[in-house]
Image (spheres, rainbow, N blue to C red):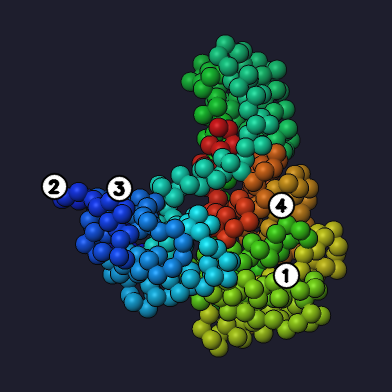
Amino acid sequence: MGFFSSLRSLFSSAPAGERPPSPAALSAGGPDGSALTLALRAAEPRLSAWLKVILAGVEAPGPLLWQRLAFFLAALETPAGEREAFIASFQAWVADMGYARLEDFRSELQYRLALALDLEDEEDERSRLVLKLSAGLAKTRGHIARGLNALFSSGRALDASFWDELEEILISADVGVEASHSLAGRLRARAEPGGPLAAGDLREALGLELADVFRPARRIAAFTPPEVVLMVGVNGVGKTTTLAKLCHRSVLQGKKALLVAGDTFRAAAAEQLEIWARRTGAGFYARGQGADPAAVAFESVDKALAEGYDVIFVDTAGRLHTKTNLMEELAKIRRVLGKRHPGAPHRTILVLDATSGQNALSQVKLFHEAVHVDEIILTKLDGTAKGGIAVAVASRFSLPISFVGLGEKLEDLRPFDSRAFAEALLG
């Protein structure tokens, strides 16, 4: 929809003398257009503040909630078809999940609105990301915080033992030997005798150096539609769920998306993906267990071209990266996609489990050699003491980490933000 400018102009501030109505006034007898408009204009111009107004007095899914959402979207001059589709999709999802209380789905609603209204880069949404990252990296941060606090205390001499100890602390958080040595060396260069930094200033400098590690190389992103996304990874990393979350984001951004069941080996894999397709409002294509995955991928492009899909998400069977024959099968899928749709797959995404630690490095190496990985999604970042593996992967392979998984909900797949990550990791 992209109506942020409309939001700010419509609901920027209340004129002098106007007082916002109470929640009771808003909830009594259904939505009062004038009362809602006044309350929205009086609120701080942030999505979370506007949502607080819209949800005042709402305790459960029902007519009041749908009316409020319809009013809010209509006030943005959102086309009727788009707002009706948004509300219908959210109604169906709430019913499918069996949610009966606002608390169960409020965060998901804010996430959907942020994507649909192109507000994900708003500072308020970034703050939510920092909070989620901070919670997810609590174990990793706790693992290194004591060491860094002592190391960066004032008066500590910046001698050889200082830099050795810094490397040991980083290595203990799974940053890796190579990346830890590189980071320590860059900090040391900043703090050479006569330089601007003392031990007490190094924490901030370390944060800047960490963020810089994740700066991706430029690449050509242009393609001939539909965009084809190929998802790969070992067993148990959450690949299919992550694919569904990516698809969910695309649908909320107004794209017509197709989920393709290229995992034809795992029992019930297609059924699982079909459920996700229904929940996210995506199309679905499968041929059944035992079919040739490359043929499924080929035929999915035919379907997408014939039916006007914008993006195709191709799931694949999880496989051990050390099994040569299985890796060759992935290479075959890639070749077949390229023959049917020149340039495809446009994005090959490797899903890594953050809890796997240094084993993730060998996964990246072998998958990249087999299918040329374009980007990485790091899952299960919440609750791991090995969050530093993100630094090791980015430093060694110069591949962008596009998203991180911070939980099991659809909203818990978030764009990776290097500054937020460094801030959450170091505290």
Q: What's under tag 4, amino acid-wise? A: Asp
Q: Residue at x 31, y 66 (%)?
A: 30
User: Residue 353 got which mark?
Assistant: 4
Q: Could you say where residue 367 lies in the image, as x and y percent from the top left?
A: 75, 60
Q: Earlier in the sequence, mark 2 or mark 1?
A: 2
Q: Could you say where residue 209 lies in the image, as x and y percent from the top left?
A: 56, 35
Q: Earlier in the sequence, mark 2 or mark 3?
A: 2
- The number of callouts visible is 4
Q: Toward the viewer: 1 or 33?
A: 33
Q: Judging from the image, what secondary structure is the residue with disc 1 in?
A: loop
- Give how far apart the Cα atoms at labels 3 and 4 are: 39 Å
Q: Toward the viewer: 31 or 117?
A: 31
Badge 3: residue crowd in 10 Å (few <14, some 14–19, many ≥20):
some
Of tags 2 and 3, which is closer to the observer?
Answer: 2
- Give how far apart the Cα atoms at labels 1 and 3 are: 45 Å
Of tags 1 and 3, which is closer to the observer?
Answer: 3
* Tag 2 residue: 17
Q: What's under tag 3, amino acid-wise? A: Glu
The answer to whether the residue labelled 1 contacts the one labelled 3, judged by CB atoms less than 8 Å apart, is no
Q: Residue at x 42, y 53 (%)?
A: 121
| Quadrant location of the C terminus in the rendered image | top right
Q: Could you say where residue 120 lies in the image, as x and y percent from the top left?
A: 44, 55
Q: Residue furthest top?
A: 155
Badge 2: residue crowd in 10 Å (few <14, some 14–19, many ≥20):
few
Q: Judging from the image, what secondary structure is the residue with disc 4 in?
A: strand
Badge 1: residue crowd in 10 Å (few <14, some 14–19, many ≥20):
many
**Rendered image quadrant of residue 170:** top right
User: Residue 44 got which mark?
Assistant: 3
* Tag 1 residue: 316
